[in-house]
Image: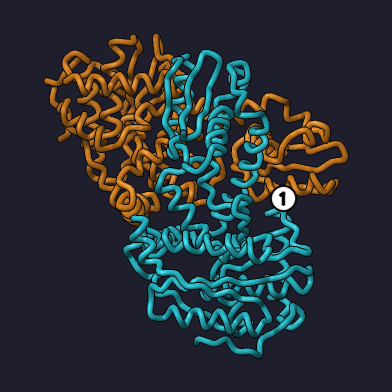
Chain colours: A cyan, B orange
Amino acid sequence: MTSAPADIPQTLQDLLPKWAHFCLYAGRFVEEELGIDLDGRRVLVGLSGGVDSTALLLVLHYLSKRVDFTVGAAHLDHQLRPESAGDAAFARSLCENLGIDCVVESCDVARLAEERGVGLEEAGREARYRLYAALRESGGYDYVALGHQLDDLSEDVLMRLIRGAGWPGLSGMPGYDPLRALIRPLLLIPKSTLRAFVTHVGTGWREDASNADPTMTRNRVRNEILPLIEKENPAFWQSVARLWRIGRVEQDFWDGLESGACENLDNTRLKSLHKAERLHLYKACLDRLGPGQALADTLFKLDEAWREKRNSAVFQFPGDKTATITASGVVFSPKH
Amino acid sequence: MTSAPADIPQTLQDLLPKWAHFCLYAGRFVEEELGIDLDGRRVLVGLSGGVDSTALLLVLHYLSKRVDFTVGAAHLDHQLRPESAGDAAFARSLCENLGIDCVVESCDVARLAEERGVGLEEAGREARYRLYAALRESGGYDYVALGHQLDDLSEDVLMRLIRGAGWPGLSGMPGYDPLRALIRPLLLIPKSTLRAFVTHVGTGWREDASNADPTMTRNRVRNEILPLIEKENPAFWQSVARLWRIGRVEQDFWDGLESGACENLDNTRLKSLHKAERLHLYKACLDRLGPGQALADTLFKLDEAWREKRNSAVFQFPGDKTATITASGVVFSPKH
């Protein structure tokens, strides 16, 4: 369908109690686990028209009438599939029926990918995030809400494991990314629940055929590896949700360590720290210097060089950042 | 083959330089990463006759002439397969050729499994560990060395992820288990390297047909899931080795936190800690009370109850251990 039916529940009270509770659960997750108070805020939903972002728009729409915040939507037509105009039409009509502002833009993602020399998935993400950032500016939005859910998180954890993430990175994507003002209110909810919810509300949604494309790593993880894992443990999604929670708590703990300035990484301070603390601190100082993920192996080598007092040893990190061992400690430098 | 050839290299100097370096690398791993000095010690090798434990016996044999420690071996005939007598004969002749003491015992593992109501894998492990413990006592061994290698570690990490491990448990089995005096000198070495090493030495080894049995979770992880992951990242074993190293450093960090007595978990102390510290501390205090893995979910609930001052709330943990919220803090109690 390219237009969403108009006769859908308009408030929490119009929903079956279990689905009203479901919306309230998502609201509590944002408040308690992400630490975000939406009261009086403006939230932009990244709306592809798929079941996840449709569910997200609906959940926030129902919550917004209770908590008093404003919901807007943004749809980017990637021009990659013949159905994409239909996706845009669906997004527009869904928002219209709910009385939600919706911006639809278009981008030749295939050309962008070629220009940048990156994959379609990455180019699409880049284009969307650029649109969201522009609309935050022009539309005065405080947060950008994305429809990632627990199946996405499971894939993400597996992909991070495969690529060789450290900890707490291995526990998956954050629910709140302050740098880009992103929030993921549905992150601990299985996709099957979102499907049941949208089915109940009755708006319908658009299927994304690219999800079945086996040339994308993500789809191979989703369609080949995850089903084997879920055969071993049908409650694997619970394992992932638990790991995510542990990761958030520990990330917060290590973030607290950073409070000391990175300019001041002298030997006295470094010697007072446990190796685990030093490794997290190195990473935090590098992250502050700009984009580029520090590799755990290089951090280990840096710490070894510091312990062995290998003065003048220089370590290169992605993003052209460097760390140098000096007589008085470790000095981090940005790209020059 | 059921008897190992006698004309094999007897010292490090008789090996190709690359294999001599390989043995020295394993020795450094034990010394530096596991923090164990083997000088003057007695080490018992758990010898199945498979390629891993054969490699382990050889590596320790060559190192023992250089570092000066004593190597013994123990083989348990599980009586599960017709070839098992041949495995025992191979273990015996291998040790004879190397001049190593070898104890061969026999156990009806199938019957043990039935009596205990556990799987064959678990019953076999239990029988082996019982033998090792008995020989440590009677043979005066300081350490029991096991042949687990990097492929085993990869499986272990995946199985822990699937079952829902927390952190640092997710990073895999320890290289040194002080409780049972176990060491795993080959833990960061891929199985393919061990195969090449034993091929070079020329002793041969015994193949274990049960490794192909798809009714065991471990074998499905090994034969179905891991190959798909290694297709995505052929250097996945490096990711696992890195994660293991990070996990060891962080385990050591959190172990340091335990130094405060668990009897003294009063509100003043608990309030001074970050949630991450409290969760690790709860777990450490429960671990001290005996066997039984505390579930992360229950630890989260315990912490919530403590924060909400739900006095008299009692939480049950595996191994019949309990935690109780009192007016003054949290009290842990063993099985009574």
Residue B131 locus on image (x, y percent): 41, 30
Looking at this view, is A52 or B41 the one in front? Answer: A52
| Residue displayed at 41% across by 62% down | A121
Q: Is residue A107 left or right of residue A203?
A: left
* Residue located at (29% from left, 48% from top): B210
Q: Position of residue B282 (x, y in %)?
A: 69, 38
- Where residue A195 appears, as percent x and y from the top left, is 55, 75
Quadrant placement of the N terminus of chain B: top left
Q: Is residue B300 left or right of residue A291?
A: right
Identify which residue is drawn at 53% across, 24% down.
A331
Answer few, some or many: residues within 10 Å of disc 1's Cα (few below 14, many 20 plus, some between 14 and 19): few
The residue that disc 1 covers is B301
In the image, A306 versus B47, the foreground residue is: A306
Q: Residue B271 in the image: x percent, y percent?
A: 79, 36
Q: Amino acid at mark 1?
A: Lys
Element marked by disc 1: helix
**Is there any visible trace of residue B66 in the rendered image?**
yes
- Name above or below for residue A222 compared with residue B105: below
Specify whether B1 is left or right of A37. Answer: left
Do we see residue B112 in this rendering? no
* Callout 1: chain: B
